[in-house]
Image (spheres, grey):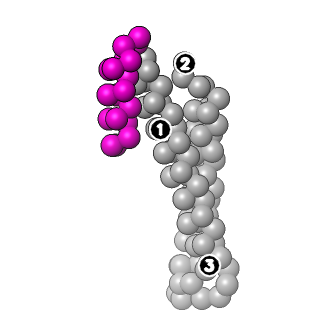
Amino acid sequence: MIDGKVILTSITIQNITVAICGVLLFILSFYSDSGTPFSGWIPGTLFVVLNIFGSIGALASMASSVSIDKDWAIVIAGDDAKQLAGRFQICKKS
């Protein structure tokens, strides 16, 4: 019932974006050590790209969380439709 492809894809995207953010922060630290942080277009561009990849990573994290929560609601409820409806209401509120 748990769609492994969605979870695997979202976790892979999340891990790749975290690695890219780490590299960008490392590069950005060299520019901040130069005495005048964010002077020129390179540090500003790196900062924007860092924020974009951070947002993509956060969205991937939410996607895997929602996928797991919805699938576990089905597993817990079993064949009871009333309990399943209640579990989905809990998932929608969180």
Crowd rating for badge 2 (residues with CA inside 10 Å; few <14, some 14–19, many 20+)? few
Quadrant of the drawing holding the N terminus: top right
Question: Identity of the amino acid at label 3?
Answer: Pro
Identify the residue shown where x is 60% and y is 64%.
Answer: 52
Earlier residue among tags 2 and 1? 2
Q: Is residue 45 left or right of residue 62?
A: right
Residues drawn in magenta? 77-94
In the rendering, which numbered label is found on residue 43?
3
Name the amino acid, label 2: Met
Q: Secondary structure at mark 1?
A: helix
Q: Is residue 83 left or right of residue 55?
A: left
User: Which quadrant of the view contains residue 80?
Assistant: top left
Q: Which residue is mark 1?
A: 66
Whether residue 27 is visible here, answered yes or no, is no
Of circles 2 and 3, which is in front? 2
Q: Specify whether residue 61 is painted magenta.
A: no
| Magenta-colored segment: predominant secondary structure | helix
Residue pointed to by mark 2: 1
Mark before the other along the chain sequence, 3 or 1 = 3
